[in-house]
Image (cartoon, rainbow, N blue to C red):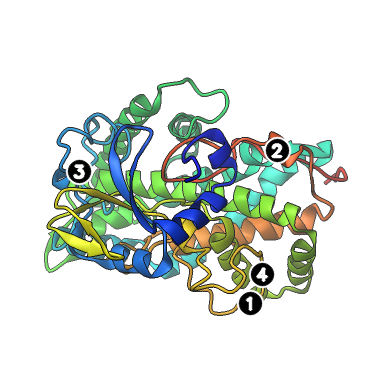
């Protein structure tokens, strides 16, 4: 069996996943944290597991009690910061109630109306480096774009957004961020969100009409039920935490894939020039499938004995669905290791499946489309400024993303 979870695996995990799909599609594996979990790598098994109600999202069902508190499963620091009551950690009926309330605030209309602001942010970031003829697209573009976007959507005042950028950098170990700062960043973010929610609640009580997402979360009600202040803070946190890192990786991985496949990049460049939105949307879906931002779906725990792909899973055992492996399963996708931006019927699992399908997927897609349109439209001769073998991928179990993406292009003034 090929080695898993070392730095060479991180650079290209797909051959190892192909081996697992063929020889051990549901395999118990010891993770770098020391926790043992079942890895599910075939598409059909993955889709079943993602929607199986016997697999709980609540870490209390984990047979290794205390693993969550030690940061071995879940988001580091979320328990200590009292941020557990979000959609990634709960099951029905609590999940049903919370998702219904959040959906009343996080509407498709709100997301669609945000597109001009995302384009404005993307152009402003490109303006800052366009005249240099070089940039690190992760640090200078893919990372700040979704941070500023979700801060604007949540209603974080502009004077506070640099704090969020610093905390987010600590959470994903952005270059220049202090090591070991994840838990501290989560706690600082939690304190700030509690204060912001309290302030916005008072403003609404005084007759304010703010239309930001946090105000929408506070106003959201269903049969007289509202989000508690703790639930609102946890939901704002997870929208920020899950929403920004997936989009950083979508933009970074997607751009990198296009730079490595010039013929496909030319197809997309023509679509951008011609305003072909259908092809642009199809391209984003293929980039999500080919080298998506979420490598493994978040933790699930068996609430009773069950069978996945012919393999018996005991009560309390963790299950990790490997989205990156499922989305290259030849039983589901023709030529799965080929990037094809015109691929039809692309039912990838990049944002999950079932009741835990990513609530922020429409916003991430919008940001991905807008970012690629801006980059390819304004920097048409964009090219890699490093050898692929010299690039490094961030460590971590769930997300997949580059640490840096150095590029060159013809300098652009104005």
Q: CA distance from mark 1 to mark 4?
A: 11 Å
Q: Is residue 203 visible?
A: no
- Judged by depth in the image, the label closer to the viewer, 1 or 4, is 4
Which type of secondary structure does the marked residue at label 4 adopt? loop
Q: Is residue 188 visible?
A: yes
In the rendered image, the vertical position of residue 284 relative to residue 82, given as above or below: below
Q: Are marks 3 and 1 in contact (CB under 8 Å)?
A: no
Q: CA distance from mark 2 to mark 1?
A: 33 Å
- Who comes first in sequence, dot 2 or dot 1? 1
Is the residue marked by circle 4 packed among few (<14), some (14-19), or many (20+) residues within 10 Å?
many
Label 2: which residue? 389
Label 3: which residue? 230
Which type of secondary structure does the marked residue at label 2 adopt? helix
Label 1: which residue? 278
- Judged by depth in the image, the label closer to the viewer, 3 or 1, is 1
Q: CA distance from mark 2 to mark 3?
A: 45 Å
Label 4: which residue? 341
User: Which residue is at a point 74% across and 65% down the rendered structure image?
Assistant: 264
In the rendered image, the vertical position of residue 249 relative to residue 81, given as above or below: below
Is the residue marked by circle 2 packed among few (<14), some (14-19), or many (20+) residues within 10 Å?
few
- Who comes first in sequence, dot 2 or dot 3? 3
Q: Are marks 2 and 4 in contact (CB under 8 Å)?
A: no
- Judged by depth in the image, the label closer to the viewer, 2 or 4, is 2
Q: Is residue 359 left or right of residue 162?
A: left
Which type of secondary structure does the marked residue at label 1 adopt? helix
């Amino acid at each position: 069996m090929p080695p898993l979870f070392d730095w060479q695996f991180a650079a290209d995990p797909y051959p190892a996943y192909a081996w697992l799909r063929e020889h051990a599609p549901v395999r118990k594996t010891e993770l770098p944290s020391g926790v043992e979990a079942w890895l599910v790598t075939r598409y059909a098994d993955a889709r079943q597991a993602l929607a199986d109600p016997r697999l709980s999202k609540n870490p209390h069902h984990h047979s290794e009690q205390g693993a969550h508190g030690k940061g071995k499963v879940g988001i580091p620091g979320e328990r200590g910061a009292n941020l557990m009551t979000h959609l990634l950690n709960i099951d029905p009926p609590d999940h049903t109630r919370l998702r219904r309330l959040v959906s009343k605030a996080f509407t498709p209309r709100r997301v669609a109306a945000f597109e001009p602001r995302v384009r404005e942010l993307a152009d402003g970031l490109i303006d800052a480096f366009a005249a240099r003829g070089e940039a690190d697209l992760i640090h200078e573009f893919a990372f700040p774009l979704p941070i500023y976007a979700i801060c604007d959507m949540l209603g974080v005042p502009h004077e506070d957004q640099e704090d969020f950028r610093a905390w987010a950098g600590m959470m994903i170990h952005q270059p220049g961020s202090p090591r070991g700062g994840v838990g501290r960043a989560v706690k600082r973010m939690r304190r700030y969100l509690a204060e912001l929610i309290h302030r916005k609640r008072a403003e609404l009580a005084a007759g304010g009409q703010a239309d930001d997402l946090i105000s929408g979360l506070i106003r959201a009600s269903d049969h007289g039920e509202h989000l508690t202040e703790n639930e609102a803070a946890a939901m704002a946190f997870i929208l920020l935490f899950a929403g920004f890192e997936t989009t950083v990786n979508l933009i970074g991985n997607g751009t990198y894939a296009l730079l490595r496949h010039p013929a496909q990049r030319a197809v997309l460049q023509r679509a951008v020039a011609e305003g072909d939105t259908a092809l642009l949307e199809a391209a984003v879906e293929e980039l999500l499938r080919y080298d998506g931002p979420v490598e493994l779906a978040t933790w699930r725990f068996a609430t009773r004995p069950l069978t996945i792909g012919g393999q018996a899973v005991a009560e309390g055992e963790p299950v990790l669905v490997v989205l990156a492996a499922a989305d290259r399963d030849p039983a589901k996708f023709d030529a799965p290791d080929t990037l094809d931006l015109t691929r039809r019927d692309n039912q990838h699992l990049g944002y999950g499946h079932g009741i835990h399908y990513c609530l922020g997927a429409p916003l991430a897609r919008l940001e991905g489309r807008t970012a690629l349109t801006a980059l390819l439209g304004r920097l048409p001769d964009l090219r890699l400024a490093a050898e692929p073998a010299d690039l490094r991928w961030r460590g971590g179990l769930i997300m997949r993303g580059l640490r840096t993406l150095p590029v060159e292009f013809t300098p652009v003034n104005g």
